[in-house]
Every structure is written in C-alpha cells, then in structure tokens.
Image: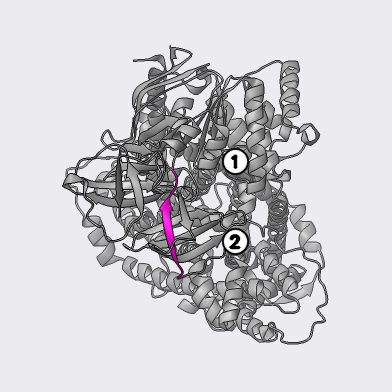
Amino acid sequence: MSIELINISKTYNGSDFILSDISVKIETGEFFAIVGPSGCGKSTLLRMIAGLIPISNGQLKIDGKDVTNLPPQERALTMVFQNYALFPFLNVKDNVAFGLKARKMANSEINTRVNHALELVNLTDFIDRKPGELSGGQRQRVALARAIASDAKICLMDEPLSNLDAQLRNKMRSEIRELQQKLGLTLIYVTHDQVEAMTMADRIMVLNDAQTQQIDSASNIYDTPSNTFVASFFGTPQMNLIPITLKENNQLSAIEISLKFSIIKSLKAGNYLIGVRPNALSIDLESNETNAVVTNIEYLGTHSIVHAQLDNSQEIRIETSSKRNLSVDERISVSVTGSHYVFSEDGQKLLNTNGGYTDGNSSKEPQLQYSI
Amino acid sequence: MTQYKKREKIQRVFHYSLLVILTIFIIIPFLLGFWTSLLPTADISKGALWSSHISLDNYVTAITQTPIIRYLFNSLLISLLTMFAQIIFCSMSAYSFVFLKFKGRDMLFYVFLATMMLPFEAEVIPNFTTVRDLGLLNHYAVMIIPFLTSAFGTFMLRQAFLQIPAELKEAGDIEGLSHWQYYYKVVMPYSRISVYTLAAYSFLSSWNQYLWPMLTTFSDNFRPVQDGLRQLQSQETFNNWGMIQASAAIIIIPTLIALFFGQHYFKSGLNEGAIK
Amino acid sequence: METQAKNPNFNIVSKKKKSVDLSLGYNPYAKDKRYAVLFLGPSLLILAIFVFYPMLRTIYLSLFLTNNLGKPTVFIGLKNYFSLLSSSSYINSLIATLIYVIAVSIFTIAIGLILAQTATKKIAGINFFRTVFSATMGVSVSVAAIFWLFIFNPSVGLLSQLFTALNLTPINWLTEPGWAMTAVVISTVWMNLGFTFLIFFGALQSVPYTLYEAAQIEGVSKSYQFFHITLPMISPTIFFVSIITLIESFKSFGLIDLMTAGGPNNATNLLVYRIYQDAFLNGNYGLASTESVILAIIIAIFTFIQFKVLEKRVTY
C-alpha cells in the first residue's frame, strides 16, 4: 500500500499554517520516518494521514485512491501512540481485541488474530494482565499487537518509544524494524530523535517551521544536508557553523589567523556559513602554528569532544580520538581534514560540498584556498 | 460536498440542538426569575409574563423596604470569616498529618475521617443546647464557631499536600526552614489551587447554610440571606412576587459573577481535590 | 495508568510497616510533637465540641424521655427506636426519603453526564454553554426554591400557563402528594447540576484523547466509544458523584422547608425535616435524637462505602 501526499497543508484560521505544501510518495513496504523538533507539526501531519484531523488543503492518496475526505476506518490503517493508548480497565487480550470486537468480528477469528499478534510480540504469557501491571516496554508491545491484529497494511507510529528508557528503546527499535519487514508493513514513523530516524528508516522526511526541509535516505541526509537546519539536526555532536565574509576577488575579510579550508567553486562576494562536522576537524599536536585555545574537554571513552576558541573568537567543537591528554587553556593547531559545506548566509541553501583537504601537499589540492 | 463532510454537518446540527435544549432547561428558572423581577407584581398576579411597565421598581422596593442588604452583609461577613478560618485550620491540621511525625498520628487521622461520616444535621439538637448554654444564640459567632474547621477540608488538603515532592521538604530541611516557614513559604503556595478550591467550597457551604442559622438567629441584624429570604417569603405570603424575585436576583448576582470568574479554579480544583 | 502515576499516595492512610528506629544522633522529628499540638489542637477542639460530643450526646438522648428544654428525664432504653420503627408515619418518611434520594441521584447523574458529554466537543460558542451548565453552582437553596415556586405556582406559574395554553388541566404541583415529590425532585436535580456538571466535565477532560483516536482508527462508533471507553474510564468519578449526591440528598432540608414544609400530607416529610419538626416544633428531643441516630447510621454507611471504594480504586 503506497501513500501519496500532494501539497498537503494545515491551518486552523486560514492564515497561519501549521504545515504547508507537504508532498511525498511513500512506497509499499517502506519504513518512512518523519523527524523534526517538537512543535514542527509532525504529529499533526500523522494525524491528517490517519484521518483524525481534517486536511485543510491538498490531497491524500492511498494506493492511488483519493482518501482525503474519508474517515479513519475507511483508510485501512492502524496507529500506535506515544502513550500507548491502552484501556486501563481491560486486560491485554481485550485491549488487543478492542477494535475487532467493536467491528463485531466472529469470536473465533478474533481469537486467532489476537493470539497470533501476541505471539509476534512475545506477550502470550501476559494475556490476563491489566496494563497497569505491565512494564513500559510490555505496554508498548500490547499497542504493537493491537496494530498487528487489525491486519491493516499501513501502520502509523507517533513517537512510540519516547516513553521508554534508553536501553529498552534500542531493543524495541530493532523489534519494530523486524516486525515491519516480516509483515511487509508500510510504516510511517514520527519521532523527534534523529538517531531513531537514521537507524530505522529507509527514508526520512525532515520537518521544521511547517515545511519539508529534506526527504532522503539517512546517509544522503547526513552527507548532503540541504540547509543548516538539517545539517545541525543530524549528527552528534552538532556541526560547526562558521560565518565568513568573502570580498571581491575572493579575499576574506578576516585574515589574521587561519583555519584553512577549500572551496572548489568560486563564489560571489558576500556572507556565507561554512559547516564542518566536529569529526571533520582534527588537532595537529606536532604543529607549532597554533590557531585555537582549548576551553573544555568532554571525555567519552573512545573519543573526546574538544571545545575550542579560534583566534578570531569563533567557538568550535572538534571530535578527536587522540590519546594525548589536552588541558584547558592549551593552545592547539586545528585543521580541516574532512568534508565541509558552504551554506548561504541565511542557512537556507547548500551551495557547495567539498571533500578537499588542506594539508597543503595533497594531490587533490583544490582550486581555491581560504582561511579565516 | 462529500459524504463525510455532510455527515459531520448533520452531527453538528444535532449537537447544537441538544446544547440548546439543555441550556433551556438550565436557564429558564434564571431567566424567568430575572424577567419577573422587572415586572409590576400586579401584572404577575394576573398571570401575565409581559407588561408595559418594565422597571427596576421591585429592586428599589426590596432594597428600601426590606433588610435584604443587611442580610447580604451578614452572609458575606459570616462566609468570609468561615472561609479564612477553614483555610488556616484545615491547612494546619493537614500539614500535621503529612509533614509531622508524632505518636498517634494515624489514629488521629482516622478520627478526622470518622467525623466526615457524621452529618451535622444529625447533631443539631445537642449543638443547639451547647450554643444556647454558651450564650451564643442570635449572634454572628453562632454561625461561625462550629464551622471554624472541617474534616472534609483537612482531608482534601492532605491529599494535595501528599503530592508535594519529598525533595522539597528535604531542601527545606537543609536550608533550615522551621515547620512554620515551610508551611507558609512552600506548602501553601505550592498547593494554592487546592487552597483556592477549599476557599470556594467553604465560602459556598457557609453561604448556603440554612437549617443552623434558622434555629439560632432570631433578628434581622444577624440573619443571613438564605433565612432572610425565608423570612421575606413568609411575611409577604407569596403575594409580592416581583419584589421576592428582585430579592432573589440581588442575592444571586454576586455569586454568579464570582462563579463566572472563579470557574477556572473550580474546574481544575474540584477534580484535583475532591476526587483523587 | 496515568492517573495512578500522578497520584502515588492514594491510600487513605499509608500502609507502611512500622519499624523502630534505634539510631542515635540528631533527631529531625524531636520538635514535631510540639508543632502537632499547635497545628492540630484548634481543629481537634472544635471537632470535639461540635462533632464528637454532640454525637455521643445524641445517642445518649435517644435513650431518654426529654423535657421541653432538651434535658433527659426518664431512661427508656431502646423504646424510642422500637416506637419509631413501628410507626407507619416514620416508615412513610423513610420511604419518601428513599424515593427522593434515589430519584435525585439517578437524574442528577444522568443529566449531569449528558451535559458534560455534550460540552466536551470543541465547537464554536462552547464556552458559553459550559458557563451556563455550571451556573446552578452559584444558586443557593432559597433562591432555587423561589425560582421553582414561581414556576410551579398554580395560578401564575409558567407550567400552569403552559398546560392551560395546551388545553390540559393544570397540575396542582405543590398540593398533590405525588406531584409535590416530583416538584421537589426536579428542583433539587436542577440545583445539583452545576456541581455535577463541573465534576464530570473535568473527569471527561482527563480521559487521554489518544484512547478515542485509537478507537476512531479502528472504526469504532461514537456510542460504542461512549459505553466502552468513556463510561469505564470515568466510573470512579461516577461512583464518587453518586455517593456525594446520595449523602447530600439524605440531608436535604432547605428546599423542603421552603417549598412544601413536609406536606402535603407528609408526602415530602424527609428525615431531616422530621427531626426539625419533632425537636424544635414539637419539643420531643428524645425522639428527634433517635431519628438523628438513624440518619447518622444511614449516612455513615454510605460514607464508609465511599472510603472503601476510593481506597480500592487503584485497580488501574
């Protein structure tokens, strides 16, 4: 079952848009994540797909059929909620059977489906328990079982793991992914957690400010973020964004100290933002030509995050696996050793990606070199 | 228009009709009361619900010829004093049950709970004798002293105080706050919604007292509104409808206004305190 | 689930095991006893004088004949109880009270629920309806009595005029036994609705909306949702309101006094009104005390049930 969103918008008063012009086609069997900060409209979008909230503008198609004006039950989908939406007064079995009973399905059929669903989520032993007697993870599984029992081929999930602790969340991630593949579900998964989206989804839609920022696979989003929002939303620690001013004839305004980087295409004079992920920076312990001073060090075991201030007083984060202990206030030499990005001044547009190096003797020596 | 939207529209029409019918049932006694308070009694007695003489005359009569304003003042004074007393005494006893540790605390709490089972109405006879012997009859005190505290209020505030995180008490201990300080600097502000609810509750129950003031007050100087209205009714023997309705309106308007502005607290507080 | 989490200390009194603390050193509770006397003393004193003593005194008086000042004279044991329970007039009062209490409770809860349910839908103007529905919360007994006395008035009342206009014979609402009870019940229910509406409305708002979303996605009809989600979810509140309404109705006095004075023909002579009559109009304090004890027992039973159920309510 494919789902197609065509220019979907949501507004409550006709002028302020909570979502505007969202378009995407989600393929059959795809695991599609919608990710964004809280308040970006991702839950609203999911509820519009479900039919719980009316669509203000645009069209929604399921399997090519226009369902924009159909009530939820006629869209043949199921949904798993953040707070599980279990009925506290019903036991596990009756919770899973709730919708089937309401639809007046035959008892034998209900039993088969409920047992099958509970088997899939390993809850057969808890059939008679009330939700209050289950752990968070088990409650989440009951919610999954209810979705499975309904037999719909489209499943919508609204932050299903955000109420669980970190360890359980990891486990449930892979369980959900496995179930999705086993049952061939088309799954739309809403989350605010970029790691969850990256590890689970085939494709990710990044939402912010009521608009789609980017729709792509996890690796493409990481490698070529379409704007600074996406760039800093994905990847921990966050990408460094460094403002620069380019003058006519490619001269930089601040020249005194150098963090060298390269740009393949030549750019017009103006202001830009340079994005460098912390793991694309490195510290040269041998060099005497220092250009920054250490302000803080977060030791994380396999690597450390070094917070430093460049000599032009720009704060940056560097990820390093160096074994040598740095200390606060120590002067270091920072250089760019990985890819970096050039964004327009407002951060809305990616202008250039560069994989070049600036160690000075590489054969991939770029056309232009800049330093700040 | 699609099927789906049509169904929604029909539902909406049905919903509004239901709302309007319910509103009529609730609001008719109010409207009728207010409306007739503007009509001359002569017209009302003829069964007319319309008159060419719509005026505030009934209100003028009520205010100048009956002690209605005095009744209102009495009730206001009694209810306010009762309210403040209950806030103080109920919160202090609730505080003891939550934050103090002493021998027999649980037993005492059961004693408090037990009093909630004893209706005041079943105890009016000895209470009447008591206040008579204390020489309190026909005075404000007789309508305040027995209600200085309330088991229900204590129970309600105790439930609210139990929700205060234990860390706050620990932080208070480390700061060296005494029980007094913790009580009025932390506990009362933290539970203010429940305190407001208790305030509203005790004010209203005092305001609505009927049997007790009827037994213990004999003069207009101390009589509260509820019994004042009874007095007016029996004196007028139901004849002067316009004036009676005007008096009712004078009494009800302040509470309706208070309710209108206090609604928010009622909604949240009643549920917080009373049910849980 | 959610409600339980918010409310960890539901038990009326915590059931923690008592253990003897033998530790030495600073005792943070050393001063608590003094504070307890200060904090709890005033309330205890008031309750002792105006609740405990009168209860014992009422029981004591119920075993005596009394003079017209309320002083006990001759000990007669349980004779008052026997004579009451064999008096057809008292049994009638009991039955009338039961009818009144049950009718008031059923209608208050049913209508209160309907009001709350219709007021939850977020549509234009809903705040106006919510305000109206809660308005009777601000109505006191005497005002309610006046409003309804006017409506039920046989000559000028709205209902009589309505009946006449429809060519029906007007009902003598307050002077015919069956109708008088009906009139009193209607007025009481009307007066109760504001409070009941607010409580139910709050309870409905606290039902997590995702439960309804989950049901909607499964295509569950609105009425099925009401009976299989709403009612079970708010059943503790319904229970709470029923008990409160029952207890309050057993204690009804003001409306009776103002509207029917127990009449006609004792048809609305409810328990509390009877106590008032016997004690303060007939001067029979012993008998009235006996009636008070019986009333207290009835109310204590209901309150006790309420506590028990509240305690057990942590089922989910």
Does residue C172 appear anywhere in the picture? no
Q: Which residues are magenta?
A: A329-338
**Residue pictured at 70% horizontal, 77% vertical:** B101
Observer-nearest residue: A236 or C91? A236
The CA distance from mark 1 to mark 2 is 66 Å
A332 within the magenta span: yes
**Quick check: A332 left or right of A160?**
left
Choose top left, top right, bottom left or bottom right for residue C99. Answer: top right
Q: Which residue is mark 2?
A: C277
**Quick check: B148 left or right of B105?**
left
Choose top left, top right, bottom left or bottom right for residue A288. Answer: bottom left
**Residue at far top of view:** A64
**Residue pictured at 65% horizontal, 34% vertical:** A174
User: How did the renderer colour the structure?
Assistant: one colour
**Residue pictured at 58% horizontal, 75% vertical:** B171
Chain ID, mark 1: A
**Residue pictured at 52% horizontal, 75% vertical:** B88
Tag shown at residue B3: none
Secondary element at image label 2 = helix
Q: Is residue C280 above or below residue A142?
A: below
Tag shown at residue A161: 1
Q: Amino acid at mark 1?
A: Leu
Observer-nearest residue: C190 or B150? B150
Observer-nearest residue: B155 or C206? C206
Asked if disc 1 and disc 2 are in contact, CB closer than 8 Å, the reply is no
Choose top left, top right, bottom left or bottom right for residue A97. Answer: top right
Q: Is residue C167 above or below residue B178?
A: above
**Quick check: C70 left or right of B172?**
right
Q: Position of residue A103 (x, y in %)?
A: 62, 19
Chain ID, mark 2: C
Quadrant (top left/top right/bottom left/bottom right) for the C terminus of chain A: bottom left
